[in-house]
Image: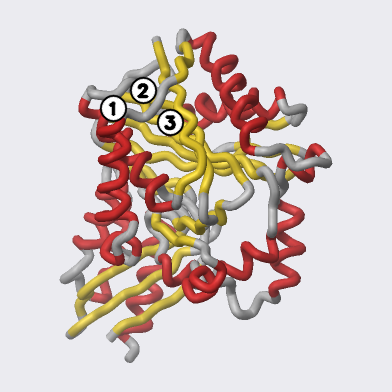
Amino acid sequence: MIVRMDRKPAGGKLLRIELEAEEGRVLRARVRGDFFAHPEELFEAAEAELAGTELARASETALGLFSRPGLVLYGASAAGIAEALGEAARALAAR
Amino acid sequence: MRLRLVDSGPAPGALNMGIDEAVLRAVAGGSSPPTLRLYSWSPACVTVGYFQSLEDEVDLEACRAAGVDAVRRITGGGAVFHEAEITYSIVLPEGHPLAPAGILESYELLCGGLVAGLGLLGVEAAFEPINDIRAGGRKVSGNAQTRKLGCLLQHGTVLLGLDLEKMFSLLKVPKEKLAGKLIAQAKERVTSLGSLLGREPGYAEAARALAAGFAAAYGPRGVELERGELRADELAEGRRIAAEKFSSEAWNRRR
């Protein structure tokens, strides 16, 4: 199952979320948009590490992953990304 | 401290991005000095930010029909239509006087060269955080930065002219928004040297002014611009990276 949604968290740029799940867990997460993340690889590592997370805990886990030390975001925030991913996870869980 | 100034003129998008990365690798490896490059785009090109999906943002069919390239950048930020513009890239090793550790601070410091160059063209402009330069209340320059291999790479554009109708014909825009409304909104936000000056300066005139502006802004930091060329091996590496990375589906459609 896969869900795609666009969300614009308060104070942030538009996020294009793609979340894929299988048996109640995240299979793959993509957070796209015109934001900046430094270093870029750390952002992609956070996306990759979401895999395996229970959908019910996706938002909370994302908040931790995207607010890790060393990852600097401009035009997006860990809270905004977590909120958008949480909404996508709830949409998947409801299917 | 010397900063090599290269004016490499027009090139396709993949090659421009390939040369930026080749210079980054050469500066990181110590075989090239810190470098400021001025360039333009031929054919026109749409680039998207590192975290964007080319397919989501760009009407690739319309680009093909119009002979416009489409490439994903190594820097973040949004989609940009490169046609009537002058572009620069600057590569500096960490610890360079123009490369402070703070990203916002470095944007402002490096954009100081553009602001000074625009002043020489008769345009009163100012840096606006995070990464824009505005003149006459509108954006005239966008900039993007990444840090890799112990170096800072920043590239950005100054619009010489602006064809919003063409730009929006190449970008995918939300279906609920009418093209006419988008164009009207963009006209309120974005401008070009052509609009600001009442005439569109050519690339050569803009390049001269920007080079002088960078020299004036960076001089007080102890940085002196020295005209140079790309070495043959840098250009060859740029071509290789253009072919293997920036022309590849694997890179351009990775996100």
Q: Quadrant of residue B36?
A: top left
Q: Quadrant of residue B99?
A: top left
- B186 is higher (above) or lower (below) than B197: below
- B114 is higher (above) or lower (below) than A14: above
Image x and y of residue B98, in percent = 43, 20
Residue, disc 1: B27
Image x and y of residue A39, in percent = 30, 43
Chain to which mark 2 belongs: B
> Residue at image x 75%, y 56%?
B187
> Residue at image x 25%, y 29%?
B28
Image x and y of residue B45, in percent = 51, 57
The three-letter amino acid code for the residue at tag 1 is Val
Asked if marks 2 and 1 touch (Cβ < 8 Å), the reply is: yes
In front here: B73 or B188? Answer: B73
Give the spatial CA distance, label 2 vs label 3.
8 Å
Chain to which mark 1 belongs: B
The three-letter amino acid code for the residue at tag 3 is Ile
Mark number for residue B34? 2
Asked if marks 3 and 1 touch (Cβ < 8 Å), the reply is: no
Chain to which mark 3 belongs: B
